[in-house]
Image (spheres, rainbow, N blue to C red):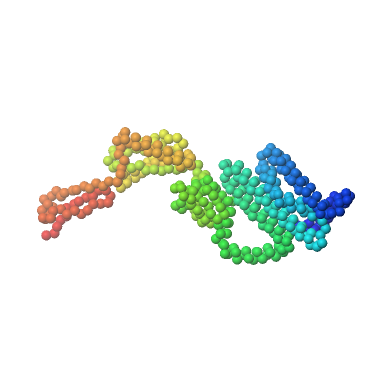
Amino acid sequence: MLTQLLETLNWQVPPWMTSYREYGIEDRWVAAVAIFLCTLVIVAVVRRLITWRAGKWADRTSTVWDDAAVDALRETRWWFVIALAAFCGSLALVFEYERTRDIIQSVMVLILLLQAALWGKTLIRSASTRYVGVRRQNDPAAAMTISALAMIGNIALMVILFLLALDNVGVEVAALVAGLGVGGIAVALAVQNILGDLLASLSIVFDKPFVPGDFIIVGDQMGTVQHIGLKTTRVASLSGEELVFANNDLLQSRVRNFRKMSERRVAFTVGVTYQTPRERLRQIPDILADSVQQQQAVRFDRSHFRDFGASALNFETVYYVLGSDYNQFMDVQQSINLAIHEAFEQLQIEFAYPTQTIFLEQGSTEHESANLGPAGPEPVGSSSGGHGLVRPQRRSE
């Protein structure tokens, strides 16, 4: 491609490169060295001047692409400048072999493609890094998308430049691409799990079920998303270790994301003893409601005498914390618990805890007493509901 373009340009020695004859210089090598040195100095000065002026201009704008372009210009390597100067100097020479000129042009094209790869990679990296740095706090989802697009852009750039390099050295690119297409099927079957995770990572990036910084729960594992890679997603768990999930497994799982939670629903139960007077039972829902409404950034929902438990009378209270921060929720719940404990202490209301009471009942008739026999009463057992009953049994004579 580029070789044909260079050939169509009909690279001839420019007239200014042969003007040395007017000064009596017949040695072409002397002219080539002079051209090499002049080109080297001119390109170095122009590169520095353009970079300085462009940097000044980019500092006055708020866009990221001009800054990225300046960073790309600064990636112009010294070996590229030397190669360019040497190529310009070689135009003043006459070679004995006809293919020498073609070889020099091919080498120069390869060097140009390598420098173009550095320019393009720096341009994409600089633009994406600056954009992500600006948007990471306000829009982490967009920042993650830009990072993925930068990765795809780098891969596409390298593939294109690699194909151009192969075409420059005489490889039939069309046949090569066709062959890779057939072989790619076999490779895809061999690495289908890796490709599945790769496609899953792209799906996560563009669909955005979660982004770095989100708190998620996957099954019985939970933590904060730290990094979304090509194959895995890394999550920092609450206990400190790093959890690594395959991207494909994440897409096949139910993920609970707490990022967009504007408020947290809280339901808790308080149990009191069965010996609590009925007047106190009527007061408990109001006590629980007052304990919740005293807190800030909460919305009270309800409080009721829910049920008769195995060893307690249970009251259920529901409220909402107006925020998603877990520490805020725990601070509110702690304050509510302390307020309930203080109120119950003042009203002498006892909290319930698992207890069991056994009642013993003796027979009252003489007939039953006469039929007990010498062995006396025989215990039957106790029930599981908390109240046991021991009754005397008649024994047959």
Residue at 23% x, 50% y: name it.
388
Report the front residue among 203 and 158.
Answer: 158
Q: How many marks?
A: 0
Residue at 86% x, 51% y: name it.
25
Q: Is residue 120 left or right of residue 361?
A: right
Q: Quadrant of the C terminus?
A: bottom left
Report the front residue among 105 and 306.
Answer: 105
Residue at 68% x, 48% y: name it.
75
Residue 197 seen in render: yes
Q: Is residue 93 left or right of residue 273?
A: right
Q: Is residue 110 left or right of residue 322?
A: right
When the figure is inspected, residue 384 is found, relative to residue 280, above or below; the finding is: below
Q: Position of residue 354 (x, y in %)?
A: 29, 46
Q: Position of residue 190 (x, y in %)?
A: 57, 64
Residue at 70% x, 60% y: name it.
166
Q: Is residue 356 left or right of residue 22?
A: left
Q: Quadrant of the N terminus?
A: bottom right
Report the front residue among 198 and 350.
Answer: 198
Q: Position of residue 135 (x, y in %)?
A: 60, 43
Residue 288 seen in render: no
When the figure is inspected, residue 40 is found, relative to residue 284, above or below; the finding is: below
Report the front residue among 95 and 332.
Answer: 95
Q: Position of residue 239 (x, y in %)?
A: 44, 48
